Image: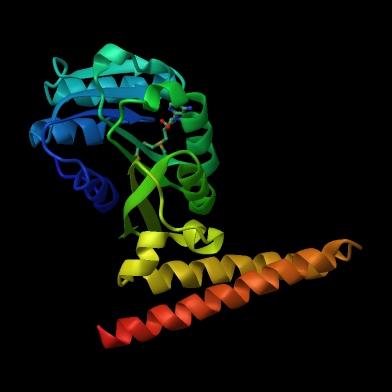
């Protein structure tokens, strides 16, 4: 099976011999690929809805993986049991706040986990802040494009995150350190979205808007500074 660039980038973060739970699996492409490539020994493919799980069932049957992939219906980490001995949890393609909610609700299930691989569709900053506050260090961050979209992928492991500055933490501490070629694209996208917020606040004509405008303006200035810096370093590469 050939994965899309986004799922391929996720697969590349999973070491051989892992036992993986793919939460919100939908079609189960990732766990099937991981088994076919002998990257994982066993996998749990879970989804909260029946229709996606039926899709997953079809993929698993088509690739004859039913002995090594356990399909489970349920919310977030509720589906996991201690005896599964899962060491790697993947949650990809969901909103950042939904991923936070899943991790928060499933805290008990995270005790023996070696790595979390998370690909939020939005609000990656809020997810990173949650991870850092809840005993996870951000180890690797990857940017990948697929079609018109740019995706952020976070590999976190139990431990103490060293970045303390909330702005840098939310933006992606390892991205800022490593300055990958797609970082300027990510920053430009964030600036574009924030400018839209700024303009709509300007139009709102509410009394309490000036404080918010000031905050957004300050964030825009900081983002522009990071972008200028990232651009310079890219020129020097
Ligand atoms: C856009 S798909 C992503 C599929 C796949 N993970 C990927 O990245 O290509 C999101 C899937 O997450 C499932 N989902 C949403 N909330 C969930 C939750 N709380 N627990 C488990 N699955 C969930 C949805 O039903 C849907 O099938």
Residue sitting at x 41%, y 55%: 162
> In the rendered image of this protein, does residue 138 appear above or below residue 229?
above
Here the colouring is rainbow
Ligand 1: image quarter? top left
* Residue 31 visible in the picture: yes
Residue sitting at x 37%, y 50%: 138
Foreground residue among 180 and 24: 180
Relative to 112, is 39 on the left or the right?
A: left
> In the rendered image of this protein, does residue 141 appear above or below residue 55?
below
Relative to 42, is 232 on the left or the right?
A: right
Residue 137, how many percent across, how many down?
A: 37, 47
Foreground residue among 102 and 150: 102
Residue 36, how many percent across, how many down?
A: 9, 32
> In the rendered image of this protein, does residue 167 appear above or below residue 223?
above
Foreground residue among 190 and 29: 190
Q: Quadrant of the N terminus?
A: top left
Residue 214, how many percent across, how many down?
A: 75, 71
Residue sitting at x 46%, y 31%: 103
* Residue 148 visible in the picture: no
Residue sitting at x 22%, y 31%: 31
């Amino acid at each position: 099976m050939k994965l899309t660039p986004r799922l391929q980038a996720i697969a590349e973060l999973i070491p051989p011999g892992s036992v993986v739970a793919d939460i919100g699996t939908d079609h189960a492409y990732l766990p099937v690929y991981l088994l076919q490539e002998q990257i994982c020994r066993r996998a749990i493919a879970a989804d909260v809805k029946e229709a996606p799980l039926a899709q997953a069932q079809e993929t698993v049957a088509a690739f004859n993986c039913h002995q090594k992939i356990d399909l489970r219906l349920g919310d977030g980490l509720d589906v996991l049991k201690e005896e599964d001995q899962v060491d790697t949890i993947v949650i990809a393609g969901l909103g950042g706040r939904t991923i936070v909610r899943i991790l928060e609700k499933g805290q008990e299930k995270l005790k023996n986990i070696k790595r979390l691989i998370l690909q939020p569709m939005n609000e990656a900053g809020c997810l990173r802040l949650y991870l850092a506050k809840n005993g996870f260090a951000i180890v690797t961050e990857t940017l990948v494009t697929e079609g018109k979209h740019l995706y952020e992928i976070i590999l976190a492991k139990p431990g103490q995150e060293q970045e303390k500055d909330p702005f840098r933490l939310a933006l992606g501490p390892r991205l800022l350190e490593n300055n990958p070629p797609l970082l300027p694209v990510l920053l430009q996208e964030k600036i574009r979205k924030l400018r839209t917020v700024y303009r709509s606040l300007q139009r709102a004509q509410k009394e309490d808007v000036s404080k918010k405008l000031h905050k957004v303006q300050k964030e825009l200035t900081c983002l522009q500074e990071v972008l200028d810096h990232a651009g310079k370093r890219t020129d020097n590469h």
